[in-house]
Image (cartoon, rainbow, N blue to C red):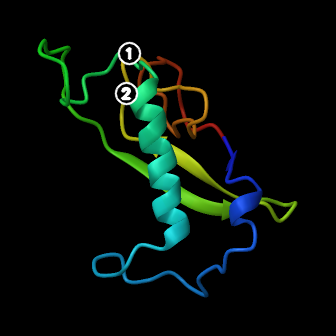
Amino acid sequence: MFISFGTEFQEFSLPERFTFPFYYDVHPLAQHAVSLLQQRLEIEDFGHDFGLDRQERLGAIGKMFGVLVVQNAAGELGYLAAFSGKLGNSNAHEGFVPPVFDLLETQGFFSP
């Protein structure tokens, strides 16, 4: 799940605290994480209609994604990526945080 920024961003200054969520400037590390995720979404086929370039409709259109910049136990900077609901016909995809509740699994409850 942890996606490293690599060596180029390891010396970047971190914010001292969270900012007000409705009015703030996005931190450059968060913006970089968003850019990396957007690049992945452009090249990987998840079987989901994001509503961008397809002429045919494949069910629900669009998807909400999020990133969280983190530092692992080794002090390395990177990010976690997540999405809401299902992506394509699954809610478990490599490189994304797993769901707390697996809506597609009949016995799928919170997995600590």
Label 1 environment density (alpha carbons within 10 Å; few <14, some 14–19, many ≥20)? few
Task: Check if mark 2's residue and mark 1's residue have beta carbons within 8 Å.
Answer: yes
Residue at horizontal 69 percent and vertical 46 percent from the top: 2
Displayed quadrant of residue 25: bottom left
The amino acid on which the numbered mark 2 sits, given as a three-letter code, is Lys
The location of residue 35, given as percent across then percent down, is 45, 51
Residue at horizontal 54 percent and vertical 26 percent from the top: 93
The amino acid on which the numbered mark 1 sits, given as a three-letter code, is Asn
Label 2 environment density (alpha carbons within 10 Å; few <14, some 14–19, many ≥20)? some
Name, please, the residue furthest toward the right.
74
Is residue 71 visible in the rendered structure shown here? no
Q: Relative to residue 48, is residue 29 drawn left or right?
A: right
Viewer-proximal residue, 96 or 37?
Answer: 37
The location of residue 6, given as percent across then percent down, is 73, 53
Quadrant where the C terminus sits is top right
Q: CA distance from mark 2 to mark 1?
A: 6 Å
Q: Which mark is residue 89?
A: 1
Residue at horizontal 51 percent and vertical 46 percent from the top: 36
Residue to which mark 2 is pinned: 86
Displayed quadrant of residue 63: top left
